[in-house]
């Protein structure tokens, strides 16, 4: 059963890699001002929807709809869950096709975020149903970070293929970088957040905040 589980996940991961390569090419060869043009004022998450959001979203949905291991698809850019024709398939895929799309026109790193969930008796009971997650950064190099099988691995797009460049990544105990939009410091409801920020400042931590989760999480991880 374990080997079948690994096989299914690898099949899905290969499709996600194809999606990330295609999105990387869209960004590399596209006009940032055209890609960042506003399509809709807000999506379900309250973000402005840009042309690149829609193009990347359509690309991912069209590829994943044909995967026989995917039962349902959920995207930040869609109001409802999409059902595939594979009604007994074991997995649900969720994604944000372009995280940080407000940064497209200024050529700051954006990315794709995804999570894969396994149905348990035809139900998704909680976040504990997640079996794989990751993100792809589209920057100076295109990098894909995957968390599965109790390991976090990093791939880099080289000659149009993702090559493993670092495996079993762990955050160091002596890290000294944190990422947060401190302009919202006085809006936080939970007082522990500000206490934590003050402690970071006391310990001479360095703040690095870009405004796209993929960039900020990646820098903190590395």
Image (tube, rainbow, N blue to C red):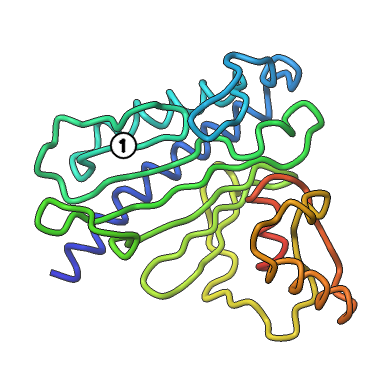
x 75%, y 78%: residue? 175
Residue 64 placement, left or right of 100? left
Q: Which quadrant would the C terminus be assigned to in this image? A: bottom right
| Image x and y of residue 185, in percent | 79, 56
Q: Residue at x 71, y 31 (%)?
A: 102
* Rendering coords of residue 149 (x, y %): 36, 72
| Residue 217, horizontal then vertical, whole percent | 65, 59
For this view, does 97 lie left or right of residue 170?
left
Q: Nearer the viewer, residue 73 or 2?
A: 73
Q: Is disc 1 surrounded by few (<14), some (14 to 19) or many (20+) residues within 10 Å?
A: many
Dot 1: element: strand
**Which residue of the protein is positioned furthest toward the bottom in this rendering?**
173
Find residue 63 and report its image quarter: top left
Looking at this view, is 42 or 146 the one in front?
A: 42
**How far from the left and from the top, in percent, is residue 180?**
75, 57
Q: Is residue 121 above or below residue 204?
A: above
Q: Is residue 46 above or below residue 125?
A: above
Total numbered labels placed on residues in the image: 1
Q: Is residue 47 above or below residue 10?
A: above
Residue at x 45%, y 64% (from the top left corner) = 147
Say which of 188 and 35 sits in front: 188
* Left or right of residue 4: residue 40: right
Q: Which residue is mark 1?
A: 73
Q: Nearer the viewer, residue 190 or 20?
A: 190
Quadrant housing residue 59: top left
Split into 4 quadrants, where in the image is the N terminus?
A: bottom left
Q: Quarter-wise, where is residue 133 in the image?
A: bottom left
């Amino acid at each position: 059963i374990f080997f079948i589980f690994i096989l299914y996940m690898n099949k899905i991961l290969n499709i996600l890699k194809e999606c990330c390569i295609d999105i990387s090419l869209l960004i590399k060869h596209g006009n940032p001002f055209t890609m960042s043009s506003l399509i809709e004022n807000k999506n379900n998450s309250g973000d402005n929807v840009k042309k690149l959001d829609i193009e990347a979203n359509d690309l991912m949905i069209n590829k994943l709809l044909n995967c026989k291991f995917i039962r349902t698809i959920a995207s930040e850019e869609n109001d409802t869950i999409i059902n595939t024709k594979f009604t007994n398939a074991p997995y649900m895929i969720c994604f944000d096709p372009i995280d940080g799309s407000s940064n497209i026109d200024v050529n700051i790193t954006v990315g794709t975020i995804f999570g894969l969930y396994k149905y348990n008796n035809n139900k998704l009971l909680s976040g504990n149903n997640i079996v794989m997650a990751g993100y792809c950064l589209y920057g100076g190099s295109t990098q894909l970070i995957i968390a599965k099988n109790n390991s976090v691995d990093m791939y880099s797009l080289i000659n149009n293929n993702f090559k493993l460049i670092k495996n079993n990544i762990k955050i160091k105990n002596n890290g000294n970088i944190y990422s947060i939009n401190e302009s919202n410091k006085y809006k936080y409801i939970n007082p522990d957040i500000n206490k934590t920020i003050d402690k970071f400042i006391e310990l001479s931590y360095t703040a690095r905040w870009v405004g796209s989760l993929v960039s900020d999480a990646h820098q903190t991880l590395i």
